[in-house]
Amino acid sequence: MSESVVAYRYAKALIDLANEQGVVKEVNEDMSFFEQICKENDNFVAVMANPIVRHDKKLNILKKIFENNVNKVTFTIFGVLTKKNREKLIYPIAKEFQKLYNLQTGVEVISVTSAVELTNDQKEQFKKIVAEVTKRDIILNENIDESLIGGYVLRVGDTQIDTSVKKKLNELKLALA
């Protein structure tokens, strides 16, 4: 079974448990915290995925970092995953949990990449347009990529709209070849 399917199943079980316990918001914050730790520390992710490191050592690492900093429900899933030798799935589970939480709360996270920083008016325009289409609250993540030259790349879920000058130049190059 693929890693993403297993991660989704654990995330679904976790969000169901969190809803049942009335702590879904806290667990979401914990999963965001865990994601942030993983993004900032490649060594942590490598240790969790390393089959040579014993599972009790991994659990001790998780205890030292998270036990007193996260909700009991969140830490319980860490223990379950460690007992089942699936520590490497915690990061994918955290990402899947975020998706499920956003779906449950009516939030859509979009990404806009442009050559220069967007103005506040431009950001609001993107949010407004996507909100009208999706009927959801929008969280906008902005990225800057000067190689785009101009235009933007908008990602909403699995959909990407690329109006960058870089893309248009590549299309022209292919047409002339």
Image: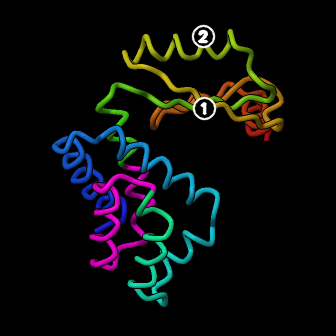
Residues 10 and 22: in front is: 22
Q: Was residue 72 drawn as part of the magenta stretch in this picture?
A: yes
Q: Tell me which residue sits at (42%, 50%) in the image.
A: 31
Given the image, on which type of amino acid does mark 1 rest?
A: Asn
Q: Which residues are magenta?
A: 69-96
The rendered magenta stretch, by its main secondary structure, is classed as helix
From the image, which quarter does the N terminus lie in? bottom left
Quadrant in which the C terminus appears: top right
Task: Give the residue pinned by disc 2.
Answer: 125
Q: Secondary structure at mark 2?
A: helix
The answer to whether residue 52 shows anywhere in this view is yes
From this view, report whether residue 52 is shown above or below residue 63: below
- Residue 50, compared with residue 94, is above or below; it is below
Number of the label disc, if any, that sits on residue 141? 1
Q: CA distance from mark 1 to mark 2?
A: 14 Å
- For label 1, count other residues whose C-alpha is less than 10 Å away and answer few (under 14), some (14-19) or many (20+): few
**Label 2 CA crowd tier, 10 Å (few <14, some 14–19, many 20+):** few
